[in-house]
Every structure is written in C-alpha cells, then in structure tokens.
Image (cartoon, rainbow, N blue to C red):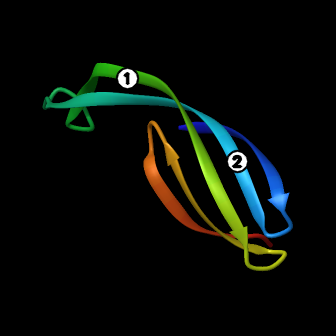
Amino acid sequence: MFDLAYGYKIDPKVRLTAEISFYREYHYTNYKDARFKEGGYHMIDKRESDVGIGTTASYFLDDKNEIYIGYNSIKKFNGGMRFRF
C-alpha cells in the first residue's frame, strides 16, 4: 500500500489530513514438486488493486508526539500515536 496525504493545521494542536491510498495484493498458490531444489513453486492466482480515500484528525501532545484517528475506504478505521525523532 502506498499513501499520499496532505495535512492542514486548523489550530496549533489540531491537524486535519486528507489522503489517497493505492493498494495492490497478490494471491499465491504453493505447489510441492520434488523436481525442484527448493521443493516446489508458486503461481499467482489473482491480483487485486484498489484506490481509496480517507481523512485523519490529529492532536499534538507536544512538538514531537501526536495521537490520531481516521477512516480510509481501504484501511477502514485506524488510529494510533506518532513519534518524531
């Protein structure tokens, strides 16, 4: 997954962010075969791709730490804490 985001501080402690996400997943089937040195091979059965949008609200605890909560059409509800070094 790859995300592009733009955030805007609406207050010194609060930021709203809009994001667009690009997603790609491969589904594999593994086969056993004694003719191969590694014992088998795999084949890609299905490829999935999707594009999603989302938004996040962040609250700054101090200059280097913030907590956030958001929603994205691919990742669904998410939240956490960010630390900056």
Instruction: Identify the residue at horizontal 44%, vertical 52% (top origin).
Output: 77
Residue under pointer 1? 48
- Callout 2, which amino acid? Thr
Q: Is residue 20 left or right of residue 83?
A: left
Q: Is residue 66 left or right of residue 52?
A: right
Measured in 3D between alpha carbons, the distance from the residue under mark 2 to the one under mark 1, in whole angstroms, is 26 Å
The x and y percentages for residue 19 are 65, 39
- Packing grade of label 1 (10 A; few <14, some 14-19, many >=20) is few
Could you tell which of marks 2 and 1 lies nearer the N-terminus?
2
Find the residue positioned furthest to the bottom: 62
Instruction: Identify the residue at horizontal 27%, vertical 29% (top origin).
Output: 28
The x and y percentages for residue 17 are 70, 47
Instruction: Identify the residue at horizontal 36%, vertical 28% (top origin).
Output: 26
The x and y percentages for residue 48 are 37, 23
Report the front residue among 85 and 42. 85
State which mark lies toward you, 2 or 1.
Answer: 2
Quadrant in which residue 74 is drawn? top left
- Callout 1, which amino acid? Glu
- Packing grade of label 2 (10 A; few <14, some 14-19, many >=20) is some
The x and y percentages for residue 46 are 29, 20
Secondary structure at badge 1 equals: strand
Residue under pointer 2? 17
